[in-house]
Amino acid sequence: MQSRRLTINGRSRFALSFGVSVFRCFEKTTLGVRRLYRLVQNGGVPNAALSREEVIEQLMDLFRRLGYDGASLAEFSKAIGLGKSSLYHYFPGGKEEMGRAALARSREWLEELVKASLEGEGNPQERLRRMMQEVNQLYAGGRKLCILGNMALSGGMPDRAAFAYTFENLTNVIDQFVEKLGLRKYSLYVMDYGAPVGYRLRCGTRIACRRSLHKTATLTRRA
Amino acid sequence: MQALIAQNGNAYAEGLTEFLNPIRKYWEYPSLENRNALRIMVDRKSTEWQYQSGVSDQMLLDPTAWIVDQAGLDRPGNDEIQLDLFYDYRKNIELYLEFFFRKYQPPMLVVWGKNDLIFPAEGAAPYSRDLTTVETHLLGTGHFALETHGEEVASRIEEFFRRHPIHSR
């Protein structure tokens, strides 16, 4: 897709892929060295001296893979190699604080990544291309998830035995939601499955909401 | 109800085309075989297709959209939920004529990706038959029109609300 728009010659393509490989390799090596250093330093007890920042790095990976609801503190503790009490020491607010920290760090990291590539060496085309490469690598060419997306996905998906998945029931849920928000005036943005749900709302004729319904229940608001 | 905006959201029999045929078959004969035949509609390829089909410039699409959607669909048990909803959609069709907008007549903006094969442009036109205040814009894109035409839809909404000031209603 990219090469259709930005055609570059063979040499710079080689240079770019070489650069990316070096970057990857560097990343792996530094991780390895850090781990090894810690092992030596702590007399073989892994991860005993993790800083909050390092814990956040691991949390980013875990939240990204497992989503917000997908992992328990016990799993975090096991994967990171820190006791639950140590996790609470760094994050007194528990999982929510961990989630917030991971998202905030991801954002900073992405900004740094984009900024560094765009402000780096080379002409604008090369910099843009480097930025795209880096972002592409961040998502492993589309095989890795967006951390925000996967965390946002978490949430209620009641079992079919407990909740019959019908449009009538979906409408009831949204009706209750609207009622709870206490909206009195509203405009509705409907899309796909949102249309039959939105058009069936009982609150549609009474109270108000502005919303976009989507399979993934996106909410949009007009300022 | 102050205003309605519909984007590739169907409420008319005219807007149901052959895309629905395998689902119709399941409605008519709700056998396990016909249910299983719908499973491909929630696989990764179908999800990608929903975003890519009808979009002339694929560069405008952010792959994150379908990757995240698919992660949701791949959660254990979610496929059965989607199949339940496919089966239940038939009840929406029965209710099409009872949807509240006919009675309450809110000002309505219709923005529609006209290359959508799931809910094609045929479903956009009939709104102007039933509503007194309606504005329709067909956009040169597919099902998820906001993916490529978010800016345009946003300004259409702003213009629409300027023309139909909702705070006075």
Image (cartoon, coloured by chain):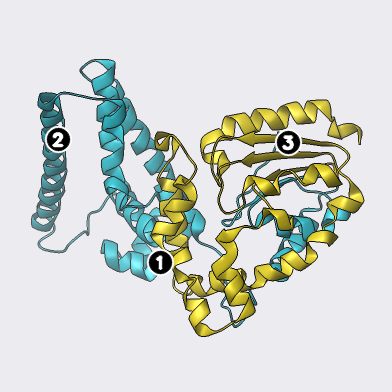
Tell me residue B168's x, y (percent): 91, 32
Question: For mark 2, does the 10 Å Cα neighbourhood hold few (<14), some (14 to 19), or many (20 or more) residues?
Answer: few
Foreground tag (1 vs 2): 2
- Give the number of the mark in front: 1 or 3: 3
Does the rendering let one see residue A98?
A: no
Which chain did the image draw in cyan? Answer: A
Q: Which residue is mark 2?
A: A17
Which residue has dot 3 on it? Answer: B136
Q: Quadrant of residue B30?
A: bottom right
**What is the drawing colour of chain B?**
yellow
Q: Is residue A183 above or below residue A107?
A: below
Q: Residue A180 or B96: which is nearer the viewer?
A: B96
**Residue A71 tag number:** 1
Question: Label 3: few (<14), some or many (≥20) within 10 Å?
Answer: some
**Chain for disc number 2:** A
Q: Which residue type does callout 1 highlight?
A: Ala
Q: Chain of mark 1?
A: A
Residue at 77% across, 48% down: A209
Above or below, comparing residue A214 to residue A165 in the picture: above
Q: Nearer the viewer, residue B102 or B62?
A: B102
